[in-house]
Image: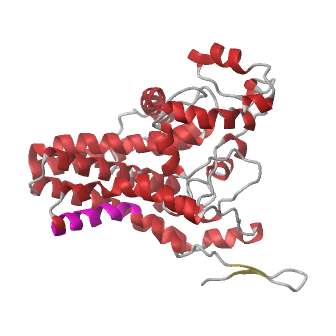
C-alpha cells in the first residue's frame, strides 16, 4: 500500500495511506457489469438476466450503502498535491473510457445477432443505456482537468451516451449558474423530476450551444465550424458510432439506440435533480450571486456508491473546487446531506410525493426556515410561502 509522506519541521513526518486506493477499481465495474450479463444469457438463455445491471444499481447498491456505511475521512491537506499527482488514479479514469465503448459495441452486437424478443431488446437497452449514462460521470471527472489528454478523452467518452455538449454546458454553464433560478440543471423546491427533465434536458442543450457559439463568434468563426466547435467533435463521433451500428446490424438498432440514449440522458437528469434540489445562492446588493460554496450542493459520503462513481457524491467540495481530483475530494461538517447514496435517492426521486416528504423538510432545515434562501419553483411559490412563511423551523422540518 502506497504511503504519502511529508517531512515536517517538528521531525515527525506526516503520513497518509489511501485505504480505498485499490477499491477505486470498483468504478470500472460499472461499464463492465453489462458484459457479465451477456455471458449469463449465453449460459442460461434467459432474458431475465439481462435486467441484472438495473437490479444491481437500484437494489443491491442501496443495500450495500446501508451495510458498509459512510466514510467522512479526508486526506491531510498538506498531502493533497502529492495524492493528486499520483497517476494511478488518473489511469483508472483513462481505462474506463475504452470500457464504455467495448460495452456499447458489445450491446449493439448482442442485440443485432441474438434471437431476442422485444422485451429482451428493451432489457438490454434499459440496462446498458443507464450504465452508459455513467460515462458522463467519467467525462465529468476528465473534462474538469487541464491536461489536454484528459479533456480529449472527456469528449470521446461522451459519444457513448450521445451527450457531447455536456462538458461545455457543465463546465461553463452549470458551474457558473449552479443553485440559481437561471440554471436549468439545478432543481427547484417543489419541482418533481419529470417537470425538471422537461426543463433541464432542452435547457442544457440550448445553453451549451449558446456558450460555444458565443466563444466561436467572438473570434469571427462560425458555430458550425466542425474543426473548432468542441460540441460537434463528440456529436460527430456519436453519429458515426450509431450509423456504423445501423449499417452492421440493421433496423433493430433503431429502437435499441433510441431507448439506450434516452436512458443515458435520464441517468444524468437523475443525478442533476438530486444534487442541488432547492438550494439557492444569495444575490448581493450588486446584483451578483455569491460564489458557489459547499453548502450549495447536496453531499453524500456513502462508501459503495462513491466507489462506483469516482467520488461524484462528494459533490459539495467538487462545486467549491471543480479541478480537485476525485481521490482528494473532502467531507465538510454541517453540509446539506442526502439520507442515502445516489442509487437510493434516484429511486426516491422517481416517486415525487415520497421525495418531497423526505427532502423538503431537509431543505428547510438547511436554511433555518428562511424561504428567501430556497430556490422555489415559480408555479408553486405562492403555495410554498403560504404553507411555510412564518412557521418556526422546528415546525418547518417536522
* Residue 26 visible at all: yes
The magenta span reads: 30-43
- Residue most extreme to the right: 10
Question: Which image quarter is the C terminus in?
Answer: top right
Q: Quadrant of residue 109?
A: bottom left
Question: Which image quarter is the N terminus in?
Answer: bottom right
Placement of 270 over or under 288, stated as above or below: below
Q: How many numbered marks does the figure carry?
A: 0
- Residue 238 in picture, x, y percent from top left: 29, 47
Q: Which residue is at a point 14% across and 47% down the rendered structure image? A: 246
Q: Which residue is at a point 28% across and 45% down the rendered structure image? A: 260
- Residue 155 in picture, x, y percent from top left: 41, 51
Q: Quadrant of residue 35?
A: bottom left
- Residue 362 in picture, x, y percent from top left: 68, 38
- Residue 379 in picture, x, y percent from top left: 56, 15
Placement of 284 over or under 110, stated as above or below: above
* Residue 163 visible at all: no
Q: Which of the pair 326/334 is nearer the observer?
A: 334
Q: Which of the pair 23/388 is nearer the observer?
A: 388
Q: Which of the pair 86/41 is nearer the observer?
A: 41
Q: Quadrant of residue 360?
A: top right
Is-magenta flag for residue 31? yes
**What secondary structure predominates along the stretch shown in magenta?**
helix
Placement of 106 over or under 274, stated as above or below: below
Q: Is residue 387 left or right of residue 190?
A: right
Q: Is residue 80 left or right of residue 341?
A: right
Is-magenta flag for residue 379? no
Amino acid at each position: 500500500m502506497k504511503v504519502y509522506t511529508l517531512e515536517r519541521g517538528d521531525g515527525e513526518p506526516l503520513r497518509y495511506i489511501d485505504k480505498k486506493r485499490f477499491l477505486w477499481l470498483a468504478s470500472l465495474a460499472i461499464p463492465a457489469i453489462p458484459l457479465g450479463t451477456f455471458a449469463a444469457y449465453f449460459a442460461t438463455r434467459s432474458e431475465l438476466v439481462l435486467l441484472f445491471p438495473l437490479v444491481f444499481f437500484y437494489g443491491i447498491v442501496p443495500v450495500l450503502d446501508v451495510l458498509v456505511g459512510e466514510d467522512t475521512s479526508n486526506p491531510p491537506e498538506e498531502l493533497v498535491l502529492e495524492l493528486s499527482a499520483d497517476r494511478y488514479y488518473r489511469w483508472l479514469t483513462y481505462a474506463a473510457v475504452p470500457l464504455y465503448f467495448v460495452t456499447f459495441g458489445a450491446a449493439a452486437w448482442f442485440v443485432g445477432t441474438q434471437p431476442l424478443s422485444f422485451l429482451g431488446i428493451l432489457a438490454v437497452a434499459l440496462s446498458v443505456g443507464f450504465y452508459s449514462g455513467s460515462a458522463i460521470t467519467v467525462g465529468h471527472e476528465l473534462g474538469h482537468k487541464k491536461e489536454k489528454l484528459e479533456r480529449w478523452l472527456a469528449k470521446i467518452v461522451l459519444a457513448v451516451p450521445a451527450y457531447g455538449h455536456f462538458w461545455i454546458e457543465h463546465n461553463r454553464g452549470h458551474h457558473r449558474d449552479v443553485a440559481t433560478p437561471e440554471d436549468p440543471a439545478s432543481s427547484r423546491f417543489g419541482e418533481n423530476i419529470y417537470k425538471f427533465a422537461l426543463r433541464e434536458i432542452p435547457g442544457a442543450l440550448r445553453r451549451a450551444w449558446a456558450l460555444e457559439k458565443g466563444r466561436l463568434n467572438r473570434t469571427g468563426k462560425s458555430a458550425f465550424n466542425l474543426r473548432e466547435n468542441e460540441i460537434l467533435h463528440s456529436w460527430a463521433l456519436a453519429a458515426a458510432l450509431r450509423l456504423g451500428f445501423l449499417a452492421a446490424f440493421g433496423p433493430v438498432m433503431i429502437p435499441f439506440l433510441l431507448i439506450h440514449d434516452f436512458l443515458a440522458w435520464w441517468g444524468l437528469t437523475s443525478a442533476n435533480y438530486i444534487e442541488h434540489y432547492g438550494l439557492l445562492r444569495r444575490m448581493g446588493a450588486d446584483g451578483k450571486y455569491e460564489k458557489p460554496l459547499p453548502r450549495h450542493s447536496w453531499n453524500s459520503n456513502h462508501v459503495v456508491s462513491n466507489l462506483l462513481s469516482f467520488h461524484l457524491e462528494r459533490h459539495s467540495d467538487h462545486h467549491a473546487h471543480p479541478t480537485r481530483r476525485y481521490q482528494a475530494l473532502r467531507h465538510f461538517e454541517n453540509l446539506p446531506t442526502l439520507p442515502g447514496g445516489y442509487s437510493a435517492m434516484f429511486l426516491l426521486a422517481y416517486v415525487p410525493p415520497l421525495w418531497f416528504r423526505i427532502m423538503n423538510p431537509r431543505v428547510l432545515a438547511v436554511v433555518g426556515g428562511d424561504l428567501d434562501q430556497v430556490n422555489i419553483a415559480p408555479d408553486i411559490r405562492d403555495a410554498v410561502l403560504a404553507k411555510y412563511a412564518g412557521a418556526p423551523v422546528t415546525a418547518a422540518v417536522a
